[in-house]
Amino acid sequence: MNGPIGMFDSGFGGLTVARAMIDLLPGEDLVYIGDTGRYPYGSKPLGDVRDFATEITRSLVDDYGAKAIVVACNTATAAGLDDVRDELSARDVPVIDVITPGVKALVSTTTTGRVGVIGTVGTVSSGAYPQAIARTGIPVSLTSAACPGFVEFVERGQTTGDEVTVLAERLLAPLVKADVDALLLGCTHYPFLARTIGEVMGHGVTLVSSADETAFAVRRRLGEAGLLRSGDNRGVHRFASSGDIDVFRDLGGRLLGPELEHTESWPPHR
Ligand code: DGL
């Protein structure tokens, strides 16, 4: 099947998922939209984020011919996954989110049953994580915390340093106090801060990112739907941004790697 996999985030965060997908599925074409013109999503009303998510999804299918959609953003998943699925219900385009795979990885990582989730204000206030954990049927004790400010550091390219550490110490204190042994990075931007987060949480805590598990979920869903590409040609990777495309190319290239050497404007026909 020839169409690309379409994916999106409010900005650079979904690149953590893109990295895992490019590594696991090197033959697949990819179109990534970073909505940097309207970021951050995490502090916006969930209704606005839902509208952004359905608009971008429509564009990925109509303008780029996407054969599957990966919502590479926890906030957009929490706000609008059902709407994104409704948008595509008549079109046979699978939708994969980051919350379900992340929770699966989290509950299989913990040994003490005390787990943590950190995310944006929108994600944490939506209750999407407690609901997804309840659906696993695995009894764990969950401590969640919103981490406003983390996303802004990543979008500025500031992934380490004293300022990041001071904020992390303050925001992660409830998780340290709850003595969790596994912490899910419930925002796709956060793996870029993993060194600082890991240092603050301490050695006994395993950081869980949804990126790898999501890439496996994508491979599984495409396989089931008969949409996986065969052969060993290399995929084409396109990146688009609703904000400054030069900034997106420069910082995105630093964060993702050499595959991001060119950025287009989104929407494509403005
Ligand atoms: N990366 C997004 C997420 O996973 C949110 C970032 C934002 O607040 O814009 O939730």
Image (spheres, helix red, strand yellow):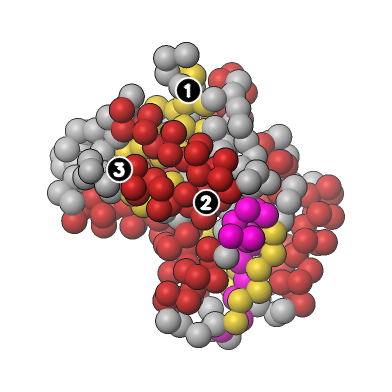
Q: CA distance from mark 3 to mark 2?
A: 16 Å
Question: Could you say which quadrant of the image residue 179 lies in?
Answer: bottom right
* Residue 14 locus on image (x, y percent): 50, 43
Task: Compare residues 137 and 45 and report the one nearer the observer.
Answer: 45
Q: Earlier in the sequence, mark 1 or mark 3?
A: 3
Identified by mark 1, the residue type is Trp
Q: Earlier in the sequence, mark 1 or mark 2?
A: 2
Q: Is residue 72 magenta?
A: no
At mark 1, the secondary structure is loop
Give left or right: position of 156 versus 245: right
Instruction: Give the residue at x 58% y 85%.
Output: 112
Classed neighbour count for the residue bearing mark 2: other residues with Cα under 10 Å, few (<14), some (14–19), many (≥20):
many
Instruction: Give the residue at x 23% y 50%.
Output: 222
Return the mark for residue 88: 3
Q: Which residue has dot 1 on it? A: 266
The segment highlighted magenta reads 113-126
Q: CA distance from mark 1 to mark 3?
A: 20 Å
At mark 3, the secondary structure is helix
Q: Earlier in the sequence, mark 3 or mark 2?
A: 2
